[in-house]
Image (cartoon, grey):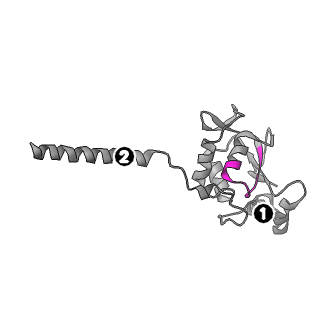
């Protein structure tokens, strides 16, 4: 009888540990807090937005490096989100061009930032959060993930109807 109770106790403990392990694996994890920080222009990313300007807008290297220092631009670029843009594509591109340190951190910030301007024609983050499409947003590498999330959810700088060139970034 004692041996049977001991076996049941081990099975119960093993079952509890298994359930806790499964829950820990599937529960959402908050990313490393450093990954929310602004990357800055010197952040090591596969490409920089200046590369995009050279490749897609056919600027010279000098033009691309100087364009964001013009009066009124304040070091920002215009992020243009068309109706063809997906959430995964948007997040991936922002990480690829060095606007965020980590894709998961931006996704987390988007999922935990209040959206005060819901939209019907939008990229759906979740049932309470949307990013307007056919919209433009002023962003820079000096903004942290929370600032970029707030801009994407709440502060488009303008809207456009059609873009035959489908540019993602503009000076």
Per the image, the residue denoted by label 1 is 54
Name which quarter of the figure residue 132 lies in. Answer: top right
Location of mark 2 (residue): 20
Residue at image position (78%, 60%) is 53
Give the vertical position of 15 relative to 116 (above or below): below
Between residue 122 and residue 38, name the one nearer to us. Answer: 38
Q: Position of residue 97 (x, y in %)?
A: 68, 59
109 or 76: which is nearer to us?
Answer: 109
The percent position of residue 155, horizontal first and vertical second, equals 76, 41
Quadrant for the N terminus, please. top left
Q: Is disc 1 surrounded by few (<14), some (14 to 19) or many (20+) residues within 10 Å?
A: some
Which residue is painted at 42% across and 49% down in the image?
Answer: 25
Visible residue check, residue 63: yes
In the image, residue 59 lies at what x, y percent? 82, 63
Q: Residue at x 65, y 58 (%)?
A: 96
Tell which residue pokes out farthest to the front in this image: 2
Is 57 drawn above or below residue 112 in the view shown? below
Give the crowd class for mark 2: few <14, some 14-19, many >=20 residues within 10 Å: few
Residue interval drawn in magenta: 136-147
């Amino acid at each position: 009888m004692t041996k049977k109770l001991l076996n049941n106790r081990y099975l119960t403990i093993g079952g509890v540990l298994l359930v806790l392990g499964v829950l820990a694996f599937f529960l959402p994890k908050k990313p490393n807090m450093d990954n929310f920080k602004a990357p800055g222009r010197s952040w090591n990313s596969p490409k920089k937005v200046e590369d995009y300007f050279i490749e897609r807008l056919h600027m010279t290297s000098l033009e691309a490096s100087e364009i964001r220092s013009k009066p009124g631009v304040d070091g920002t670029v215009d992020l243009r989100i068309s109706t063809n843009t997906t959430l995964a594509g948007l997040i991936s591109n922002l990480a690829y061009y060095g606007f965020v340190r980590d894709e998961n951190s931006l996704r987390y910030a988007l999922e935990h930032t209040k959206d005060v301007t819901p939209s019907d024609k939008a990229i759906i983050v979740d049932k309470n959060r949307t990013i307007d499409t056919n919209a433009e947003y002023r962003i820079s590498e000096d903004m942290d993930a929370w600032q970029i999330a707030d801009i994407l959810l709440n502060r488009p700088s303008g809207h456009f109807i059609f873009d035959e060139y489908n540019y993602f970034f503009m000076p």
